[in-house]
Image: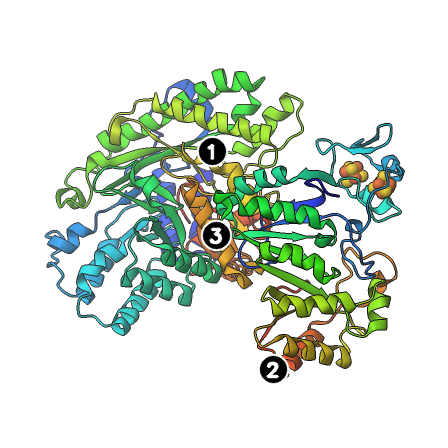
Amino acid sequence: MTETLSQLRRIAQNPTLSFKQKAHALAVEAENMLPYVLLDAETRAALDTRVICDMYEGHAPYKPRYVLPDYEVVLRNGSEHLELPKPETLDEAISTLQIAYHHVPSVTGMPVFIGHLDALLLPFCNGVSDDDLYRKIKLFWRYIDRVLPDAFLHADIGPTDNRVARTILRVDAELKQVAPNLTFLYDPEVSGEAMLRLCTDNIIACSKPHIANHPVHREVFDEPGYAIVSCYNALPLRGGAATLARVNLKKVAEASTSEADFLEVQLPRYVNLNARLMRARLDYLFRQSGFFDGNFLVEEGWIDKDRFTAMFGIFAMAEAVNHLQDLAGRPGRYGHDAAANAIGHRISERLADLVAHEPMEHVWRGVAMLHAQAGLSSDAGTTPGVRIPYGSEPDPVSHVQALLPHHQHYLSGVSEILTLDETVRANPEAVFQLAKGALQLGFREFTANVAGNDLVRVTGFMIRLSDVKLYNAAKGSRVNTTALGAEAADTVHILARKPRVVGLELMAGSSV
Amino acid sequence: MSDGVAAVSKFLTWSVVDGPGNRFVLFLQGCNYRCVTCHNPHTIGVCSDCGTCVAVCPSGALSRTSRKVVHDPGVCIACDSCLAACPTRANPMVRRMTVEDVLVLLRRNAPFLNGLTVSGGEATLQLDFLIDLFTAIRAAPELAHLTLFIDSNGHLPVDGWRRVLALTDGVMLDIKAFDADRHRRLTGVDNDLSLASARLLATVGKLHELRFLLIPGETDRPEEIAALAALARELGPQTRLRLNAFQQHGVRGPAAGWPKMPRDGLEAAAVALRAAGIAEVAVPSVWLP
Ligand code: SF4
Ligand code: SF4
C-alpha cells in the first residue's frame, strides 16, 4: 500500500503533468488497485515474466481499448441523449462532431478516431466557398490540436479526391500540428495519382499523412467498413478493438533451442497463453464491466457490440530472428540478409495460422486480428513489430522489399516508418515513386518521416522535437504524447533512428 | 570491358540525387581523369590482381587463386581496409555484372524507380556495355517507364556520344574547370573534350544538368564563374546548373588538406550566376556541419 500511495503522490506532485493528465494517471492507478481479471497460473506466469503483455491496460477493463464510432449516425440523426438536433450546415456539422468527440471512451482518455472527415463533411459543403471551407477547417484543426492534444487521435480522409480532403491536406501542411494524426485511404482506381502526389508532398512538409492501401484493407472488412486509428491500426468501423495483448517474440526465441523448436513448440505455446489472457480480459469487459449496458453510444447506433475485434499483437521480430540466426550459427541479420528475412516471413505466416485457430467469444468474426505492435515507451532492447532495428535500416527501397512479405498477415495493421534523408526535399518525385511502388506491391500502409522536420513520428504517433526538448527541460508540454515521446527517446533510442524516428503506441497503461 | 560484362563498384536501389525521381544507380569502375579532389578515389583504378590488399583484410574476405584476387561478400565486414591499401586506387570488391544481372535488379525494383543512372568512375569508359544495357532496357516492356541517364565527365569524343545518345534520355555532365592549366592540374587531363561534349549534348537536347565543383581558391575564382556563366549562356536559356561544394570527405593525397568550400562562397557564386541570366542554379540541399 505504501508503494501505491507514493506512486499516487508522485503523480499528484509531478510538475510536468497538467491537471487533466494527472486525473487520468490517478484513475489508471485506482483501477490497478483492483484485483487483476482471473487468470490461470500458467498464463499468469507468462504475464509476470512479460513473454506476453497486456499493454498495462489496467486490471479491470471497463472500456474497449479503441472505439471507432460511426459519426455518420449523429450527423444523420442528431442525438437524443446529447439533445442535439440533426445538423443542417457545415458549422453545425463541425460543432456536432466536436461535441461527439467528448463522449468517446478510449484507453488514452481521448478519442483515437475522429471520423472519415471528408465523407462526413462533404454533404454539408454545397454552397460553401473554397475560402470559407479553408477557414472553417483551419479553426476545426486548431480546436482538435488545442482541446484534444493527443497524437493517437486520428482522422481519415479519402479514397476520393475531393475538396474537403484537399483542404485538410492544405491546412495540415500549413499548421504542422501534432494532432490530429492523419491517414489518407489510397485507392489507385479512385484517388488518382495527383492525390497521391499531394499526399507525398505533404509528407515532405510535415511527415503526414500516413497512406493506407485501401483496396487491401477494404477486402478484410465488411460493411460499414473500417478506419485507420491511433498508431495505424485497421479496425472495424462502428466498433473497434476490445483489447490488445502482445507476445514478445524475442523472449519466445530465447526460450527456444532452434528455429524448429520456436515454430513448432514455443510459439504455439505462447500464442495460446496470450489468447487466454485476451479471453480473460474480454470476458471481464463484455460480461462484467457493464460497458455496453445502457450505453447511449450503443442505443443510438454509434457503436455495435458485435463489431469489436481483439488485437493480437507481436513485437521484437528482429531480435527473435537474430537470436534464431545465432542459434544456427549464421551471421546474417534481420533486414539485411535474405535467409534471416525468410525466417521472419515464416514466423509471420505461422503466427497468422496460429491466431486464426484461437477462437474468442464476443469478438467480431470470432477470432483475433494479428497486429505488428509498435511498442511501449518502456520497451528496451526490442524493436517494434516486425521493424528493422533503429539505426540499422537499409535504404528505403531495400527496406520495403525486406518487409513486404510480412504485410499480408497483419490484418489489423503493420506499420513501418521509412526515414528519408533531407535531400528528398529537392526531389519530391522520388517520394511519390517510393510510395506508389510500395502500395502497388501490396504494402498495407506507407509511412515516412523526412529528416529535418520538427514534426516526427515516434513509433506511430507524432511529436514535435522541440516539445521533447522542452519536456526534457521539465517545462511540461501541452501535448499528451510528448511525455511518451520523451520517454521513448530515452529508453528505446528512437531518435537514433536513421536519420531520425519511428512509430509506436507507447506507454504503460495508457498515456500520461 | 565488353561482351555485355561490366566492372561495377557499387549499385544503389535508392538515390534521389542522381537525376529526376528515385533512380537505380550503377557505379562503373575505372576513370580516365585523376582528380586530386575525387571523393571516391577507389573507383578510379582497375585492379591488377597484385594481391597487396589480401594481407590487410581482417575478415578473410579476400583470397588469391592462381591469378585472381577474389572477394567473398558473405564474409566481408565492409571495413574498407583494402581500399586504403591498394596502390592503384582500385577496389578488390568490384564485381563483374552482365546486362542480364542488371536487368534482374531493375525488374525487381521497377515499381520504385523513375529511372537508371549510370555513373562511375567514368561511365562512358565502358561504352559498349552501356549501349548493350540501354538497348536491352529499351526492349523490355516492363522497364519502359525508366528514363536512362549517364553521369559523365565528358571525356568522350563526339563519335562516341553518337553511338549512345539515341538510347539516352539525359546526361549530367561535370565540368571540372575552365582554365586549361587548372583543369590539367586538377584532373591530369585537358578539358577540350569535356567542353565539346557540353556543346554537343546541349545541341541535341540531352544535357540534363551541368555540374560544377567549387574548390576554394581554384574553381570559385571570379574568372572561373564568369567562364561558367558564359558557357551556360551559350548553351541556351534552358541550361540547368548544379553547384557542388568541395568536401575533404574521402579525398586522398594533398587535396585532403585543402579547405572545404564555405556555404556563403557557394551561395555568392549562385547569386552571380543568376545575375548573369542563368535561370536554374541548384545549390546543395544539405550542408554537413
Ligand atoms: S584491389 Fe588493388 S591492391 Fe587489391 S589486388 Fe587489386 S590492384 Fe592489388
Ligand atoms: S572491406 Fe576489404 S578489407 Fe574490409 S573486410 Fe571487406 S574485403 Fe576485407
Label placed on residue A405: 1
Q: In the rendered picture of this protein, how many numbered marks are placed on residues?
A: 3
Q: Which residue is mark 3?
A: A433
Could you tell me the amino acid type at mark 1?
Pro
Tell me if A438 is positioned left or right of B289 in this view. Answer: left
Q: Which is nearer the eye, A318 or A434?
A: A434
Q: Residues within 10 Å of mark 2 (few under 14, many from 20)?
A: few
Q: Position of residue B182 (x, y in %)?
A: 84, 71
- Disc 1 vs disc 3: which is toward the camera? 3
Q: Quadrant of ligand 2?
A: top right
The residue that appears at 34% across and 47% down in the rendered structure is A229
- CA distance separating discs 2 and 3: 33 Å
Asked which secondary structure carries label 3, the reply is helix
Disc 2 + disc 1, Cβ < 8 Å? no
Tell me if B183 is positioned left or right of B239 in this view. Answer: right
The residue that appears at 15% across and 66% down in the rendered structure is A89
State how the image is colored: rainbow
Asked which secondary structure carries label 2, the reply is loop
Could you tell me the amino acid type at mark 3?
Gln
Q: Which residue is the extreme one toward the bottom?
A: B275
Q: Which residue is mark 2?
A: B277
Q: Position of residue B254 (x, y in %)?
A: 88, 61
Do dots 1 and 3 share one subunit? yes
